[in-house]
Amino acid sequence: MNSRVFARKLLAELPKLVSSGVLDEDSSLKLREYYEPKAADGANLTVLVFAALGALLIGGGLILLVAHNWDELGRHARAVLSILPLLFCQIMSLWVVLTGRRGGAWSEGTGIAWHLTTGAAIALISQTYHIGGTVPDFLFGWALLTIPVTYLISSVGAFSLWVLTWSAWQLSAFAGQMEFSWLFWPVSLIFLPYIMGVYRDNRYGGRAALVSLAVVALTGAGCFSSYLFLKGQMSVYLAPLAATSIYLMGVNCFKEAENPRQNPLLSLGALAVAILILVFSYEDIWRHVMSRYAYSFRDFKGAPGWWTPYGYANFALFLLSWTALLFGALKNKVYHALSFGLLPAAVFVSWLLNKSMASYFPGVIIINIYGLAAGVFLVTRASKAGSIWALNRAMAFIATLIALRFFDSDLSILLKGVSFIIIGAIFLAANFKMTRKGRVK
């Protein structure tokens, strides 16, 4: 049974259990304190979503009303109308703090509105007074000005929007703000206490799930920027390091998650690792990786002189994160994490063999064997656990890996067709066998 549904039913039964003498008051109070956060999980996420939707609708309506008469207004009137929504949101935020409504619907709606009205005010004031600037300049100022919003009213929605704004700035900074791109991780780490606080409150709740998605977005943007700053051959390790770090973070920090929604880090990290295994299983990818003409930031004109140490610092951050998380999984005896957690090591060994043998074939063989072994291990583990969803995911990965090799080979259409039929039959047999045993989760 879903933990949230079970928690709600148990909380509803507690008064009856106390009145009938099955539980005493102290035990009932302890159970209520433990299960109330679980019961409120779905409600908190629903409140957050609808608060965000309400803020967006109200903001959009106000913008349309102002835009209808915008051309008829003078400069000063435009400036006042540009700043008024922002001031209103700041007043509402003060009210949220003073009335103790931080973390609720009012907090989320106000935080989202504050973030959006800040960007709107910057854009409208710049347009009204013809202030010059580029898109990276706009995003940079918007992100820096909205840093306090998340901490002031504890709004996950505002934090998520800030992550999108900051990531968009980092990805666009190479068009005009390369000299400030090194600020990406130092500024992002300002929110580390907030992230840890959300996880401590309820790491399996809806708020924590949104924070995890924001962490994935930050990691992706940091990985992309690091790729541009590194040498072509060295940058090949960044994506495996980033993906496995996310995956191992989900393994280490969300051990008791009951479904993928409660552990998006594990789900998205595993998906990214699976995709990378499929990508590196092709010879053409290794041919590009091993080429001395592989893409790198050297191709950019006007690159700042510190681009090399910045790229190495980013690489070291991902490498240390992966190493620490991998050792953490081994220390906690979570050995199944090795199935997908060793991808960077497999890529490195493949690169070494390719380099020493002056061929692309060893890397292709190693990654295909690694992917097949990981898939078989996951199928075995899912079968023992009785999880039909995990079983189907693992088998789908194996089937995709095999199918890609068949399409990439010179085998006859007849042999390929027979092979696909066999794979499909194995799928059906495994599901039928598990269902008949009644071990489905």
Image (spheres, helix red, strand yellow):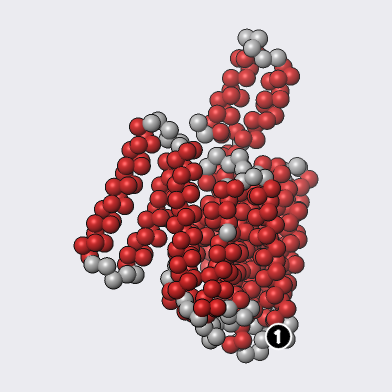
Rendered position, 16 above or below 288 = above
Question: Residue 330 location, x and y as percent?
Answer: 65, 49
- Give the amino acid at mark 1: Pro
Left or right for 97, reference 204:
right
Mark 1: secondary structure? loop
Viewer-closest of 34 and 309: 309
User: What residue is rendered at 57% in x and 44% in y?
Assistant: 262
Which residue is label 1 attached to?
304
Rendered position, 98 above or below 65 = above
Viewer-closest of 83 and 435: 435
Viewer-closest of 420 and 160: 420
Q: Residue most toward the front?
A: 357
User: What residue is rendered at 65% in x and 55% in y?
Assistant: 326
Counting every numbered tag in the picture gives 1
Q: Quadrant of the C terminus?
A: top left
Q: Residue most toward the left?
A: 414
Task: Say whether residue 279 is visible.
Answer: no
Q: Quadrant of residue 214?
A: bottom right
Viewer-closest of 12 and 257: 257
